[in-house]
Image: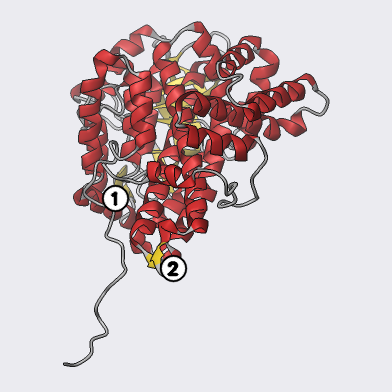
Amino acid sequence: MAATTHTVTNQPPPLVGYDVFAADRALVEAVERHLDPALLDEAREDLSALGRTSGSAQVQEWGVLANENPPKLRTHDRYGNRIDEVEFHPSWHRLLGKGVSAGLTAAWSRPGGHVRRAAGFMVWTQAEAGNGCPLSMTHAAVPALRTDPALAAEWEPRLTSTVYDQDLVPADRKPGALFGMGMTEKQGGSDVRANTTAARPLAEDGTYELTGHKWFCSAPMSDGFLVLAQATPGGDKGGLTCFLVPRVLADGTRNVFRIQRLKDKLGNRSNASSEVEFDGTWARRVGDEGRGVRTIIEMVAATRLDCVLGSAALMRQAVAQAVHHCTYREAFGGKLVDKPLMRNVLADLALESEAATTLALRLAAAYDDGSEQERAFLRLAVPAAKYWVTKRCTPVAVEALECLGGNGYVEESGMPRLLRESPLNSVWEGAGNVQALDVLRAIQREPGALDAYLREVGQARGADHRLDGAIKSLLTELADLEGIEGRARRLAERVALVLQGALLVRHAPPEVADAFCGSRLGGDWGSAFGTLPHSLDLATVVERARPVS
């Protein structure tokens, strides 16, 4: 018999055909912990249905196709008419439509909605992260619109609808609508008070004409946008103000919304991010003149939480792929997952993933609670989590990719797509310094925020000496305000790590909490993943992270 060189052996099967939700023990337990028991059966059923869809071969293929066929800008039609349309691959519309139908924009309209949506957002992001942007902005627009009851009554039912309609027609003719946001400009970036877009009042009360530009406007095919512009003298007060810009006007004509180009991005390629110009663009004021930042800040806070959720989801998928690969792959006489050094790496990655998931769902639960104390807690916890969790995503993706060896560096593995996506949430909605300074601002200006945070972490006091030491060290740092701005990143990191440690001590299995506190809080850790103390029960930590449902 002739020898063959084409027998394939020792290759792990693809991670496909599984329930992404049920396979994530940390996420399942967080949902069970934070939801009213009366809602659990329905929530589990819905999330598992979404999990099976997300883990299916068909949806995974949609994600690949949406990424390999990025959106295209069509500025003019064949006759030379300006149309400013973005053409997406059909897989993009399928993914976005499924996200809408799964209620990922409907958190505000049902009990336990934020926890259920947060879990669903994490599950669906693992299929393809690009469609998370319009889902996130549509969800987050609701609290900003509620500053104007008439606008909220008009738009909220559309934004919380579970029907996706991609047609560019007036919003009142659609069963559901999507929203975008435009804040940053070329000269200002995160310094939105440097915006130069001008808003001139029109005859009809509350309406304006906008002239200017936006340097970043994602999902430009949305039905409406919240934007910031400088109200010119002649209005009530003038100054930076929030406006609603509809994509199509009530009479069916297109609003002036000139898409200049689409950004050529590192990752997130299935989603269109654009530069847009306003030139006599019709807009309606949201909130009072001069109060634009205050009006839109709740939208920003909600999208920042989605950055945390998105990064936690990417980490979870990266860790699931790494553990799955090492469970089947053999080297040096045994399974990779059983090798002590690889087990250390996988356990370290699993800790980072579980800590991110646990923190993200705790923040979502605070939104559902809505009490004054929980709102104060969010004021400090959200920017700290946004700072830290999003920054941990890229190192996790890099190390998880390495667990697959050369296979992980190949596009077909899916790991390069995760890696390219991983820095995104750290950059969007305010990069690291913006978040760190916001943590500092909350501590200095809002004592209730720090009090609520300390009450939260205090619930775990006495359960682990390393956590107790970290809390004491944090309090010492807070007592020393000299040079505090230069230490803002260090402070934000410690705030997030102490909160993660406290949550894991209270809720995670002892093996997970012990390993996290010993490494992240106790200092028994190296400068790279895979440097956990050898005496820990790492096999249990890895097994908990294995994607089996």
Q: In this view, does 432 lie to the left or right of 164?
A: right
In this view of the protein, which residue sits in the foreground, 375 or 295? 375
- Give how far apart the Cα atoms at labels 2 and 1 are: 22 Å
Would you identify the image quadrant in which residue 365 lies? top left
Q: Where is residue 32 in the image (x, y as percent from the top left)?
A: 33, 23
Q: Which amino acid does label 2 sit on?
A: Gly
On screen, residue 54 versus residue 274, left or right, reads left
Question: Can residue 30 be spotted in the picture?
Answer: yes
**What percent of the width, then of the height, locates residue 434?**
62, 32
Q: Could you say which disc has been placed on residue 63 in the image?
A: 1
Which residue is at 39% across, 29% downward? 137
Q: Nearer the viewer, residue 72 or 389?
A: 389
Residue most toward the left?
1
Residue that mark 2 sits on: 406
Residue at x 28%, y 36% (from the top left corner)? 22
Q: Quadrant of the N terminus?
A: bottom left
Q: What residue type is labelled 1?
A: Gly
Q: Residue at x 62, y 16 (%)?
A: 454
Question: Alpha-carbon neighbours of circle 1 within 10 Å: few (<14), some, or many (≥20)?
Answer: many
Query: Which of the 4 quarters of the picture holds residue 209?
Result: top left
- The answer to whether residue 202 is seen in the rendering is no
Give the quadrant of residue 107.
Answer: top left
* Residue contact at pointers 2 and 1, CB within 8 angstroms: no
